[in-house]
Image: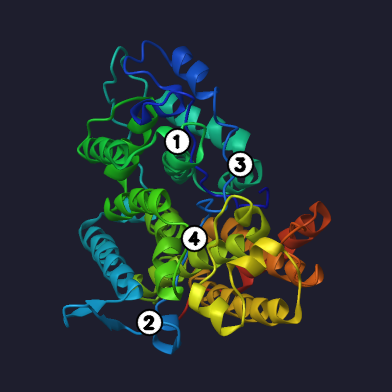
């Protein structure tokens, strides 16, 4: 997918069945040239519906949603948190981490992160941190061209950090969606998570890990969203159906909403904003969920050909539909009515996301507005195709993408941060 700043993070891997050598990175990186050679082997492999696009999400939807309640009863009679409540707890932890750093940070740090990069020693090489960031930028420029252009609007330090996050997410996603997917086991994902833990402790495994290790040391980025994205990969190994929206919500958070929580600390909140940190993260989560739901609605036919149905099973049944109807690929009145309700929910999340984009740092607003506007237009294209997402792929043409840029820029300039706190 190539929409301005919309294609955020699509992870990548290599033909090597060892997940710890994702993207062909071998254990002993003897030189940056060797890294470049190996990385180029597989970075063109994955295009996935669960593209981890630039994100923002919503808890106010939880308060009005009739699909899932705030709590559910377990079989043992205990009260268990719904998916939305579980995600909300992650939001609270991340917001608390950001607030803690803001209270202790100097004015210079609040304006931007200005520390000189620390030299992280890599296996078989020294002083490659700057080169690692450059390599992340090259990967981003090659495999997410329009998003890369959006990052150029950010400050140099923030730009590099976003590149590092992009590459980690791409590599992670490709573990279960790349050419080695058949070799990936839950144990392999456990190994990838252990590697993540080492990265957050300042012990990167390779050059690209080193760039992210430096990023998380500079910004108040919590490890939990990264762990949760790996959990989304585990879910893909064992599930191809989702019984209700609460079930699907958690999956969408894992594979897309997490990216918003990873990136907001880097993109920054406008110093003039009076909105709560929590509300900005809620909006970040909303855009991630909206984008992911849009991907799901766009790719119904493609997923069906892979034996996957990401639509809530209970809602299909209520509409008088089943998996067999999806596999048949016929557009009926029942299908049109069902799709109208699905599109309405996705747009609701986009509406919630808008409230947070205006609170971002001025240098980050334009690419995020472009992302939001372009992804929302995919929903319009589904309608224009008469809801035929079985054999027609809804996409935003180049002319419409270009036309969206001035509007996105105007919104980024004219829509100012709130003058009072929001909940």
> Compared with residue 234, is residue 209 higher up or lower down, i.e. above or below?
above
Q: Earlier in the sequence, mark 3 or mark 4?
A: 4
| 270 with respect to 77 (left or right) | right
Question: Which residue of the protein is positioned furthest toward the right in this rendering?
Answer: 399
Quarter occupied by residue 188: top left
Q: Earlier in the sequence, mark 4 or mark 2?
A: 4
Question: Which residue of the protein is positioned furthest toward the front in this rendering?
Answer: 324
User: Which disc number belongs to residue 182?
Assistant: 1
Which secondary structure lies at badge 1? helix
Q: Earlier in the sequence, mark 1 or mark 3?
A: 3
Label 2: few (<14), some (14–19) or many (≥20) C-alpha neighbours in 10 Å = few
What residue did someone put label 4 on?
55
Q: Position of residue 140 (x, y in %)?
A: 55, 37
Q: Earlier in the sequence, mark 1 or mark 4?
A: 4
What residue did someone put label 2 on?
421
**Where does the C terminus fall, quadrant-wise?**
bottom left
């Amino acid at each position: 997918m190539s929409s301005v700043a919309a294609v955020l993070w699509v992870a990548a891997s290599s033909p090597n069945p060892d997940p710890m050598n994702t993207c062909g990175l071998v254990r002993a990186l003897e030189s940056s040239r060797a890294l470049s050679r190996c990385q180029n082997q597989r970075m063109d492999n994955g295009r996935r519906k669960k593209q981890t696009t630039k994100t923002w999400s919503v808890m106010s939807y939880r308060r009005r949603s009739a699909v899932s309640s705030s709590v559910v009863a377990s079989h043992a009679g205990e009260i268990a948190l719904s998916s939305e409540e579980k995600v909300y707890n992650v939001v609270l932890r991340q917001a608390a981490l950001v607030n803690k750093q803001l209270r202790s940070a100097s004015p210079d740090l609040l304006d931007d992160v200005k520390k000189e990069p620390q030299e992280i020693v890599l296996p078989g090489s020294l002083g490659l941190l700057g080169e690692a960031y450059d390599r992340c930028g090259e990967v981003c420029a090659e495999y997410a061209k329009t998003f890369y252009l959006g990052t150029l609007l950010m400050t140099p330090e923030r730009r590099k950090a976003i590149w590092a996050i992009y590459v980690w997410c791409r590599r992670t996603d490709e573990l279960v969606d790349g050419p080695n997917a058949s070799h990936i086991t839950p144990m392999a994902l456990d190994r990838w998570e252990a590697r993540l833990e080492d990265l957050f402790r300042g012990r990167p495994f390779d050059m690209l890990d080193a760039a992210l290790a430096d990023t998380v040391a500079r910004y108040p980025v919590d490890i939990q969203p990264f762990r949760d994205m790996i959990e989304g990969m585990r879910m893909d190994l064992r599930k191809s159906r989702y019984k209700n929206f609460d079930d699907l919500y958690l999956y969408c958070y894992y594979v897309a909403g997490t990216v918003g929580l990873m990136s907001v600390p880097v993109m920054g909140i406008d110093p003039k904003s009076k909105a709560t940190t929590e509300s900005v993260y809620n909006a970040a989560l909303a855009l991630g969920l909206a984008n992911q739901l849009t991907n799901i609605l766009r790719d119904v036919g493609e997923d069906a050909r892979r034996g996957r149905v990401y639509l809530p099973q209970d809602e299909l049944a209520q509409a008088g539909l089943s998996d067999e109807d999806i596999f048949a690929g016929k557009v009926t009145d029942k299908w049109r009515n069902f799709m109208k309700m699905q599109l309405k929910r996705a747009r609701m999340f986009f509406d919630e996301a808008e409230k947070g984009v205006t609170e971002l740092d001025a240098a980050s607003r334009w690419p995020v507005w472009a992302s939001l506007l372009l992804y929302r237009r995919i929903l319009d294209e589904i309608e224009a195709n008469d809801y035929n997402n079985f054999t027609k792929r809804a996409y935003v043409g180049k002319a419409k993408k270009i036309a969206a840029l001035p509007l996105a820029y105007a919104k980024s300039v004219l829509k100012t941060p709130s003058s009072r706190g929001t909940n």
